[in-house]
Image (cartoon, helix red, strand yellow):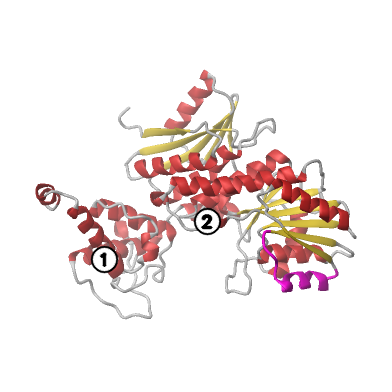
Amino acid sequence: NSAAPQVVVHAHALHDAGAALGSLALLADAVGGLDGVALVVLTAGAQEVTGDEELSPASAALVGAARVIAQEYPALGCRVVDVTDASEATAARVAAEAASDADDLVVGYRGRHRWVRGFHAANPTTPEARLREDGAYAFVGALGPHSIALAQAVARTRGVRIALITPVELQVDATRALSQAGAKVMCIACDQCDAVALGGALDRVEERLGTLQGVVYAPAAGGLAEFGGIAAAEPAAWTAQLATFGADLEALAGALGERTPEFVLLEVPLAGAVGGVGQARLAAAATMAEAAAARHGWTAVAWDRWNHGGDDPLGIVPDEMPAALDAVLALAGEPSVLVSTNDLEARIRAASTVAPAASGEGGNTLYERPSLDVEYTAPTNEVEEQLAELWSGLLGIEKVGIHDDFFGLGGHSLLATQIVARVRDLFHLDLPLQSIFEAPTISRYALLIEDAILSELEGLTEEEAAGLMG
């Protein structure tokens, strides 16, 4: 059927999350600029539906990546289909799913049943686990300000004992704050990637503080949190980063051994649920960690962004941590808990959709240029003129100056993907997504385009260059 979209299915059987993510990124970039193409990521064991699945964190990593791919390439229909068998019946269902116009991001087939991932708002009142007076709790891993705020919330319980196990020595202020709250504090420097060393650290904690009632683990994101668009993917580096992250997760499982604390909270980024342009690796790590938590019987807690004295009205502030911790502990035992400061489903839709009203194309009203710190400067050459027209249409602003900042005019990451896609069409150039972040004005972005064109021309013969330039 020539009217049907062309479908590309990415199926990965390796147990290497980084290799799977790297090949998926290359494939997404290859087909992302094509019209009428659907990309289906076929996984096995990426989703827990019945509770009987053998979960694969490596497969689950692709779920978070797929969400970001759908945001970086809005025209590309990208979705994940999770299966548990390779029967002909399942193959037929996957084929039908791939050819359908459904827009569900994550779908699972279990027998004859089709499952779609969603989120359930919870307002817990009865705690599944609770903090115990004179209890012992360990905080392990990359303990940032929010982890310390969480530890302070634990320290409010009478007689509580807290161990901080981290690769580096914590600041004296952090431990002093816990002591002043009444907690007995023990600090151990330990490589969280070494299961034997981490297990030994937990042994020392229990010798001094008693049996652990709870463990909070914050794996280090490292380079996974750095901005990196799909078009600029470096498979080898991404593979190494996810391998280290996965090793950290398994090190905790090995270190715990036969210990059975009342809860193990695994801190993960909210990017696994909401995505974020340039955050494919972080989103992949988040969904990978969620699957690991479910497999080991832990609870993955995806925290929203934090506000440590800044002006972010939606960030979680330290004073809100005790109530948030109570709510999380009430759900301890659930494989995945997400803490969001606003409606999560609405947030996901907003992160994945460019509202028509934000664009001046298609006859929409163009608004006057807002008041900025720089004066309006008109385009000075053809490239700048084309960019000014493009920015004007996408931003819905009547006149855009060549020194106006894209983000100062209301631009955001999803519109940035539109800029890169249109530049690909206009100039036949594949500039990386982060180029708009590095050169957020028309004048600077035009220079990037001109330099890229010159680089291409230098590699052509005179006949090829003449043909390219018409």
**Can you give x and y, in whole percent of width and height, for residue 187 in the image?**
77, 63
Q: In this view, does 401 lie above or below 51?
A: below
Q: Is mark 2 on a helix, strand or loop?
A: helix
Label 2 Cα neighbours within 10 Å, binned few <14 / some 14-19 / many ≥20:
some
On residue 223, which mark appears? Answer: 2
Q: In which quarter of the image is residue 131?
A: bottom right
Within the image, what quadrant is residue 415 found in?
A: bottom left
Amino acid tagged 2: Gly
Q: Is residue 131 visible?
A: no
Apparent side of residue 93 relative to residue 142 in the rendered image (left or right) = left
Measured from the top left, where is residue 307 in percent x and y?
Answer: 62, 69
- Left or right: where does residue 215 sit relative to residue 464? right
Vertical placement of residue 237 versus 317, above or below: above
Q: Of the residues shown, which amino acid type is indicated by label 1?
A: Leu
Q: How crowded is mark 1: few (under 14 residues within 10 Å), some or many (20 or more)?
A: some
Q: Mark 1 points at which residue?
A: 447
Nearer-the-camera pick, 206 or 361: 206
Q: What element carries label 1?
A: helix
The answer to whether residue 369 is above or below residue 50 is below
Q: Name the one closer to the observer, 317 or 399.
A: 317
Report x, y in % for residue 272: 57, 49
Q: Which residue is drawn at 71% across and 65% down?
A: 148
Q: Would residue 463 be counted in the magenta stretch?
A: no
The segment highlighted magenta reads 167-182
Quadrant the N terminus occupies: top left
Dot placed on the residue nearer the N-terminal end, 2 or 1:
2
Q: Do the residues labelled 2 and 1 touch (CB within 8 Å)?
A: no
